[in-house]
Image: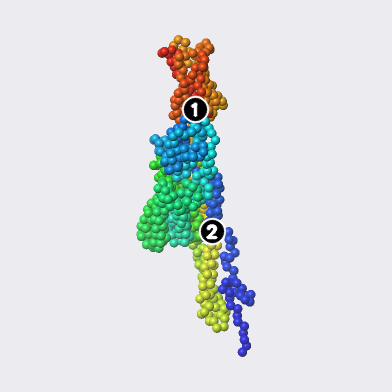
């Protein structure tokens, strides 16, 4: 007998055997040469990277805290010098705020509390939002600092500080935080969570609506299931993060306070906290909806039962989606300002339309890349849904723009208005790209896909036949001494099955890519999705930017309260006529230095002949009508014929002051004249 060398056994990994001869499993895979940057994962990664980049740029350009309520006035005013200590300090805001202990603190020059330390009193009257704190009695002269912090009605923290002086300004050792409330690392993370929450909502609602309304067969497609489930997970995780970070975001700015139970309880008692908890409860109902959609609904075969289930899911899912959208409407811009009762349902419609359009767009992109069997009818249905969504967006967007901007000057002169212009431009660009997608949709047919499936089937059958015959030979050839073909066959059969699946998928992809209409539609939808990502980031930033109407109102109130200062001492000249004998003349008034605080006032009266004129009585009063201050009486002393003077005349703040002068020339002849002047 002659010995024979054992044949080398094929490698299970498809690598060359010990003798260097490649095994049958070592044939190059049909998909091995595909570029790693192509395919659906690259598209999704590109969109995610674009969203992160745009969000980062917008967050970097935004201020540390988006103040939606604005301080429009105070008493005493910023920089005012008052003669005696006021009993209380009051602050006026442009819209409703939430305050608590320590929201308004008054600190003396040595940084000690000068207020009583109790919770601010609500002094609001009608549309005027005003809060005040009482001061300690017997405060000494010096400069006092008022530091305040609150939560605006649309959930954003606001803060600020100003000073006033008693008697005369002095040095102060008060050190205020350099970082505004809502800023820092906590503010950045909270802002990112807000962006992610909107993205998750759009994927969840838009993806489910796309499956239910446009492509029911997509309920059995794994890519569509993963898209909707990931949207739910994203929104849930972002909501939990916002709930935990809410306390440090509006308070200390420290991550450790996220797990402070007392702070969390305080958050739950606020409107934003209640909205976040409501959203989590509704997401529990959304999880049940997803289970039915991709479970019972996907397996249902009977047409009548499926139609009934579709109606039930549409109603239930619509209620849940509207409820989730309402958690934003009840705690942000729509819940405050004018016409809140109309604005909140309009905001819900706006959010649902955004989700149906942009979420459906992402769903279509995933379907075109990951599920080549999507039909042209599903694409056309989505085209109709998108058109309806755009109509709703246009109507609700116009109303929201009018409500939040209010004037053409606010549209171009405020950050909110400028972002709104960018948003409108992006929508116009998105509609232009959508027009090309609609053209590709009109050309789309199902024939290429069917033909492709047939060709792929034949190719697969031929491959199976040839590989099956090869398997028999290979199994015998691969057997080592002592092994039979039955020992190797199961392993070899599994390997061949994997090769057949890869070959079939590759052929399907090649045939699908050869369809020019479908490829053109995929590129167009990808471009739409890219623009939509930027649009979503800008829209999210709009929700954290002070509305143009509020900003302009705050600027107007501030300008009225702090009118430009005069360039120096104030000089007035006012003619008068009491109507009696020798009742005509001129009053000249000097106010020096003509700014808030202590001033010297001199009054001269000249007769009609230009000579100094004595009168039995002279009275002066100062009134700041914009702040409802005064009239503040001034009793000047007579220094010489026709000359009166008063020292240490206290003007509490800058503004448009009305100077009233009463001149009596006889027992019955008297007149009061006035003139308005700017005092710094």
Looking at the image, can residue 167 be seen?
yes
Residue 657: image x %, image y %? 48, 26
Q: What kind of element bears circle 1?
A: strand
Which numbered circle lies on residue 41? 2
The count of marks equals: 2
Whether the residues at callouts 1 and 2 have beta carbons within 8 Å, the answer is no
Q: Nearer the viewer, residue 116 or 238?
A: 116
Q: Foreground residue, 659 or 537?
A: 659
Q: Residue 445 at what x, y percent from top left?
A: 49, 57
Q: Which residue is mark 1?
A: 651
Task: Identify which residue is drawn at 51% across, 25% down.
Answer: 648
Residue sitting at x 61%, y 75%: 17
User: In front of the other: label 1 or label 2?
Assistant: 1
* Residue pictured at 55% horizontal, 45% vertical: 61
**Front residue (pair 297, 191):** 191
Q: Secondary structure at mark 2?
A: helix
Q: Residue at x 39, y 42 (%)?
A: 341
Left or right, 659 with reference to 25: left
Asked if 86 appears above or below 157 in the picture, the reply is above
Badge number at residue 14: none
> Residue 517: x, y in percent?
53, 56
């Amino acid at each position: 007998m002659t010995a024979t060398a054992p044949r080398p056994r094929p490698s299970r990994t498809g690598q060359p055997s010990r003798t260097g001869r490649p095994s049958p499993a070592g044939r190059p895979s049909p998909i091995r040469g595909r570029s790693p940057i192509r395919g659906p994962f690259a598209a999704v990664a590109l969109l995610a990277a674009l969203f992160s980049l745009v969000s980062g740029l917008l967050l970097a350009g935004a201020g540390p805290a988006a103040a939606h309520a604005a301080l429009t006035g105070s008493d005493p005013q910023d920089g005012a010098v008052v003669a005696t200590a006021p009993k209380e300090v009051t602050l006026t805001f442009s819209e409703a705020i939430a305050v608590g202990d320590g929201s308004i603190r008054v600190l003396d020059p040595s940084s000690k509390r000068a207020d009583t330390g109790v919770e601010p009193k609500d002094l609001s009257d009608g549309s005027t939002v005003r809060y005040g704190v009482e001061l300690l009695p017997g405060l000494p002269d010096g400069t006092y600092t008022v530091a305040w912090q609150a939560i605006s009605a649309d959930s954003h923290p606001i803060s600020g500080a100003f000073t006033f002086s008693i008697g005369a300004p002095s040095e102060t050792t008060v050190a205020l935080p350099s970082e505004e409330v809502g800023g820092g690392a906590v503010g950045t993370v909270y802002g990112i969570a807000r962006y992610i929450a909107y993205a998750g909502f759009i994927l969840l609602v838009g993806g489910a609506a796309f499956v239910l309304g446009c492509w029911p067969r997509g309920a059995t497609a794994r890519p569509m299931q993963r898209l909707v489930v990931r949207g739910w997970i994203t929104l849930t995780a972002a909501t939990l993060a916002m709930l935990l970070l809410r306390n440090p975001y509006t308070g200390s700015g420290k991550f450790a306070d996220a797990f402070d139970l007392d702070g969390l309880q305080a958050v739950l008692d606020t409107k934003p906290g209640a909205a976040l908890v409501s959203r989590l409860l509704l997401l529990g109902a959304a999880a049940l909806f997803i289970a039915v959609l991709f479970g019972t609904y996907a397996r249902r075969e009977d047409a009548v039962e499926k139609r009934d289930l579709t109606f039930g899911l549409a109603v239930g899912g619509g209620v849940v989606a509207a409820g989730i959208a309402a958690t934003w409407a009840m705690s942000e811009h729509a819940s405050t300002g004018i016409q809140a009762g109309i604005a909140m349902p309009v905001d819900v419609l706006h959010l649902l339309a955004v989700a149906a359009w942009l979420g459906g767009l992402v769903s279509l992109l995933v379907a075109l890349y990951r599920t080549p069997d999507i039909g042209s009818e599903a694409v056309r249905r989505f085209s109709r849904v998108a058109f309806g969504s755009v109509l709703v967006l246009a109507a609700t967007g116009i109303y929201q723009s009018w409500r939040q901007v209010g004037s053409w000057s606010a549209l171009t002169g405020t950050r909110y208005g400028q972002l709104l212009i960018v948003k409108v431009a992006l929508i116009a660009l998105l509609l232009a790209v959508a027009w090309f997608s609609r053209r590709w949709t009109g050309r789309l047919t199902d024939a290429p896909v069917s033909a492709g499936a047939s060709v792929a089937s034949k190719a697969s059958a031929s491959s199976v036949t040839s590989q099956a015959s090869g398997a028999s030979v290979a199994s015998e050839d691969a057997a080592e001494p002592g092994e039979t073909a039955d020992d190797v066959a199961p392993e070899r059969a599994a390997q061949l099955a994997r090769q057949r699946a890869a070959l079939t998928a590759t052929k399907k992809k090649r045939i699908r890519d050869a369809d020019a209409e479908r490829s053109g539609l995929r590129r167009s939808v990808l471009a739409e999705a890219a623009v939509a990502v930027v649009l979503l980031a800008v829209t999210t930033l709009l929700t954290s930017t002070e509305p143009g109407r509020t900003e302009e109102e705050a600027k107007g109130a501030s300008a009225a309260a702090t009118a430009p200062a005069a360039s120096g001492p104030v000089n007035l000249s006012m003619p008068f006529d009491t109507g009696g004998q020798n009742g005509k003349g001129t009053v000249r008034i000097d106010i020096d230095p003509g700014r808030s605080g202590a001033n010297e006032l001199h009054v001269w009266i000249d007769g009609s002949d230009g000579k100094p004129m004595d009168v039995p009585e002279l009275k002066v009063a100062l009134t700041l009508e914009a702040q409802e201050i005064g009239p503040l009486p001034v009793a000047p002393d007579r220094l010489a014929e026709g000359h009166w003077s008063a020292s240490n005349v206290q003007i509490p703040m800058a503004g448009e002051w009305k100077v009233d002068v009463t001149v009596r020339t006889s027992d019955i002849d008297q007149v009061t004249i006035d003139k308005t002047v700017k005092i710094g």
